[in-house]
Amino acid sequence: MTPRQTRAQRLAMPLARHVVRDLAAEHGGCLRPVQLRRTDLDTGQVEQVLVPCGHTLASVCPSCAERAKTLRAAQCREGWHLETEPTITPDEPDDEQQMWVERRAETQHDRDHTAAAGQDTAELDELSADLDEQITRSGMRGNVLPARPARRQRSTRRRQDVPDLPRRPVTSRTIGKTYTASDGRTFRPSMFLTLTCDSYGPVTADGTPADPGTYDYQRAARDALHFAALFDRFIQNLRRFLGYDVQYFAAIEPQRRLAPHVHIAIRGTVSRVGLRQVLAATYHQVWWPSISTVRHDDTNPPVWHEATGRYLDPATGEFLPTWDEALDAIGPEDEPLHVARFGPKFDAQGVLAGSRDSARCIGYLVKYLTKHIGACQQAASDAEHAHAERLADALRYEPCSPACANWLRYGIEPKNPREGLRPGRCKGKAHRREYLGYAGRRVLVSRKWSGKTLTDHRADRRAWLVRTLGITEADPSRYTWAPVRPGDPDHMPPAQRLLHVVADRQRWHAALAEARARASGQPVPGVPATKEAA
Ligand SMILES: [Zn+2]
Ligand SMILES: [Zn+2]
């Protein structure tokens, strides 16, 4: 007979479903597998297949996040020291893409006829713009027309304090120069570069301001919001400066002071002097309306006018200026809302293919990719909590985009207005604490980096597994796939899926160990191989 247990003893026992979860994670199995029903068209046989969720955050699925990180490291490694130009063959356009381009062509034809007849083309221009957006959304690059004349002339005058940069025509070459050592060996060095934001005030060792009262949180917030655009500018300038189509793999992370910085693997090299020149000439001007005056605080927000789909000033009943009107009101004497630049401090080192440095730098580049940008630096002390809090406060009412609800606070109707917008409650990711003002992609990879997409790299890995395991994959056109939904008779609850994941992973590990042992000529225990490779 089992002895009677106290409540405390029972609570101290591990929960069975937690054990399964931990075991699945330990075996590298997905914790949130998606269930699909696979039907073999030849035999009619139906099988349940659990597909990994593919999430990139370890807090959601540690195994999938780790696999995604490994894949990024492979992508980084393959592109960094390429010795031959990658061949890029674009995919054939699909039916949907062709349809959008055809519609766009018709619209252009109509528009040009209308213009030739001296009639108003505004409506057709608008339609063209919508179609261009659809074309981009359907997964095509670039525009069908190189750049329509800008609707509005905006000041692009150079700032007086920005030094001119030598500009060379950019050739299509993407690989760096080779050098010959005294012993005759040739080598092609690449670079690892870290760029940071400027100082917002002195900080102590834990990254918190020495004097929170004078630390420039507003500039910190705006630099973070526009960091991605600034990075783009830097790459453009670097290409013009070096005269070739420099390729990069970059990862964006926060520093201890919670400002973003970027680690960049660059194919080829640039001198420190050159780098300093490019950095000094790199800036991003944000030509947005001024937000120096709060016109509607939280007690008197603008009101939605259903009939017109616009916002009104509650005091005067007048429409707020639209986003376009507010942009048009920016005069030649006005200053940009913000000018983002990198700080003068940077870190640059040359890296050779296959070196220990190269492996170490790739480790840096992918180190934090499985975490939210705000989770990379965990606040421990009161000072760190307070610093994070003040940054979040500074981001609360900063407009994150033309469509940000915060524009209402400054008496401007956001772009594409809709009901229910509340200043200080914008849904944009940049305002959320875990993003620290930077809501862009964490990994930025130029198009001709490795000449492969992440899907290609994933396929490489799968092909390697299939070869190693010595299995033959069935022709994919033999199967149809359908998602299994809750309520379907064959739907498995999450706990049951996890049990299958554990079993699948165990079989798979055994098969891999066996294949490796066989490859190295060691005796192998008899283990049955499995069908599902990854
Ligand atoms: Zn997963
Ligand atoms: Zn916003």
Image (cartoon, grey):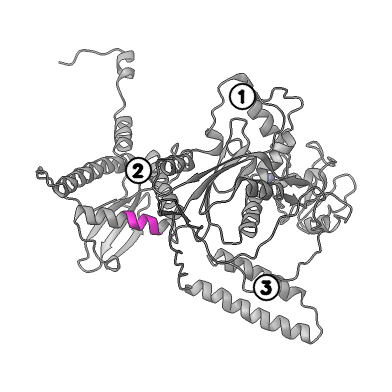
Query: Is the C-beta of the residue carrying label 2 under 8 Å from the nearest atom of ligand 1?
Result: yes
Structural distance between the alpha carbons of marks 3 and 1: 50 Å
Of the pair 157 and 268, the residue shown nearer to us: 268
Residue 375's mark?
none
Q: Amino acid at mark 1?
A: Glu
Mark 3 against mark 1, which lies toward the viewer? Answer: 1
Residue at the spot of label 1: 384
Q: Secondary structure at mark 1?
A: helix
The answer to which quarter of the image holds residue 105 is bottom right
Query: In the rendered view, would you say 284 is above or below 94?
Result: above
First reached walking from the N terminus: tag 3 or tag 1: 3
Tell whether position 457 is magenta.
Answer: yes
Tell me if mark 1 has few (under 14), some (14-19) or many (20+) residues whose alpha carbon lies within 10 angstroms of its own: many
Ligand 1 shown in quarter: top left
Residue found 80% across the figure and 47% down from its top: 161
Q: Give the secondary structure at mark 3.
A: helix
- Residue 217 position (above or below residue 466): above
Q: Quadrant of the N terminus?
A: top left
On residue 30, which mark appears?
2
**Dot placed on the residue nearer the N-terminal end, 1 or 2:** 2
Asked if residue 449 lies left or right of residue 206, the reply is left
Asked if residue 301 lies left or right of residue 65, the reply is right
Q: Quadrant of residue 348?
A: top right
Which span of residues is magenta-colored? 456-461
Sequence-wise, which precedes: disc 2 or disc 3? 2
- Nearer the observer, 56 or 486: 56
State whether the magenta stretch is mostly helix, strand or loop.
helix
Residue tagged 3: 128
Res. 8 image quadrant: top left
Query: Mark 2: which secondary structure?
Result: loop
